[in-house]
Amino acid sequence: MKTIRYLFIAFFPPLFSQGQELPIIEKASGATVFFNQDLYVPGDTAFFKVLLLPSLQLPLDGEQLLHIDLINKSGIIIFKQNIKVKEGGGGNQLILPNPLAPGAYIFNLSVNGVSHSIWSKPIMVAGEKRFTINSDTGGANQSPQNVSQQNSIEILGVSASYFGRQKVDVKIDTHRPNDEFLKSNVGVRVTNLKVASLFSPQNLVAGKPNGVNVSKKRNSRGSKVDLNTKLVWQGKVLYKGTNTPVPDSTHVAIFLQKSMMGYDFYALKEGRFSISSLFDFYETDKLFVLAEYKGKELPIDLAIDQQEVSSLHAPVLSLTENREWYSEFSMHKGEVDRAFYFSKENLDKGTTESNSGDLLEDEFQKPDITVRISEYLIFPTIEEIIREIIPSLSVKRNEDDLRLKMNLLISLDNPVASKETPLLIIDGVMTKDVNFFLGMKPADVISIKLIRKMNKLLPWGLLGKDGVVFVTTKNPLVAKEIVAYYPEVKGLTKALPFYTKNYSIPGNPLIPDFRTTLYWNAELPIDETGKATFSFYTADSLGEFIIQLEGETVDGQSQFGTKPFSVLFKPKD
């Protein structure tokens, strides 16, 4: 079961205060990024391996948090994500937005808020026509200093050609004559040559956000560095609908709706805040926010700092008259995949989701009052239901104010009216919108439950101080309507497995299998002798393919390995 976490950090200073720099590795530092392909179309999943390359040897132990921006030729950041790697390297993926204009896009990688120079090709997004990079644009065809150009990883056991759906067994040897082995796992891709250029330093594009050329070779000096491994949110707490900050020391509570994590904290001068997520959460989440100053609730907006424009620009491209093969391939592949979607393999797949409302109820132990609406005559409005059948809850109206009030139990014989509207949790989504609640259709409501005992409410701090009302409905669209305009925060991107077809397992042989990347592994483990093995199956896609490997030795030298082969049509017996 998912754990609900609510943390009081109001009485502790923020992990990173206003104006305080995050700890950094090195201003002059770099990274390499190795993709499963060099060419994509909008909507593709670009798998990649990233390896941090500080200019001095700085041992990277444990986990590191990396922030990635995808930047276009105008310097606009079109996509953001956060990933975690271990020991300075690891694999993840980027789902390219759809639609996305054809052209070149670059990665900007930040560690602890400091941009890293990245030695990698730009991400090429194909359009109808083929294109080339203009040689006079910044960053194109530049190579970093002191990069080893050795194609020294041996690839063994691979034949010159195979038929479709045939198994390929590969052995690799990373051992060098001076007994230096790779320091980390190897990145491996097996890709059609039409969407892959030979992976070599001459083809790399250097982005240099710090204005320095970076040596990828490390020396033997250095000491451990303290890397931030948690997401940090910074911004301002503003009066709702304005740019006016709330007073210093305003008490603020936030709750991540999907991840079910909450934080209490105090705003600083000019409404600034800076808090660190102490627990990992994934993908985008919606924030419910609540604020109080001198005992009175404040209507607020949470303005989270967002960088939308970068000083970096992706290379400018020139279109040719030639049609782009990969765009046509992807279009036809999509048509084939849709035609065979309702195969047994896809129909068998399914997901289940837990009810966040039930989990929140469990966290409060059990409701103090439960009313099942179906047991009563249907009233025309929620307000009449409250007045007639919901004990300890009332609606208070005056000329310019509408509130709910709950009788809270400090002890069994000591009820006290709440000062503000109780927290409303409708199908697991938090709100304080009384008008929305009273405007709901009674026929949509299954039950209304109240938490009014203070011993249950105290652990929830500002969120629970006026009581809690749980509402369960028959309509899943109600909760979506509530969170539609809530502020968003970007969590981590969870590394997904790369799809590889195993033809040793029985399946439907009539389902077509068209793939340009036959195999991808961001971290193929190397044994103590510097060797490794892996295998994959060819697909129905014919043509020229290439096995490419990328790794780094203990002394910081980049190593590569390449091996071409063909996939041929197998005639019927």
Image (tube, rainbow, N blue to C red):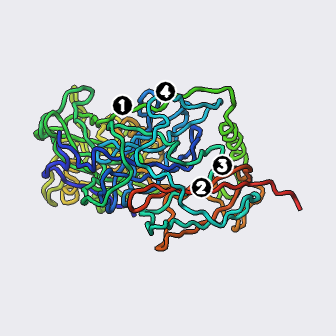
Answer whether labels 1 and 2 touch (C-beta < 8 Å): no
User: Exactly how many numbered labels are in the figure?
Assistant: 4
Residue for badge 2: 562
Type of amino acid at the residue the image marks with label 3: Asn
Above/below status of 73 relative to 286: above
Residue 351: name its quadrant: bottom right
Compare residues 212 and 67 and report the one nearer the observer. 212
Residue drawn at x 53%, y 46% as measured from the top left = 46
Give the mark toward the camera: 4 or 3. 4
Q: Dividing the image into 4 quarters, which one contains the C terminus? A: bottom right
Label 3 crowd bin: few (<14), some (14–19), many (20+), radius 10 Å: many
Q: Residue at 23% x, 49% y: name it.
A: 23
**Residue annotated with mark 4:** 136
Towards the viewer: 338 or 90:
90
Mark 2 vs mark 3, foreground winner is 2
Checking the image for residue 311, the label placed there is 1
Mark sitting earlier along the chain (2/4)? 4
The residue to which callout 3 is attached is: 192
Kindly tell me whether residue 376 is visible in this rendering: no
What amino acid is found at the position of numbered circle 2 in the picture? Answer: Thr
Q: In this view, which residue lies farthest toward the right? A: 573
Query: Which tag, 4 or 1, sits closer to the chain's start?
Result: 4
Q: What's the amino acid at mark 1? A: Ser
The image shows residue 110 at horizontal and vertical percentages of 34, 44
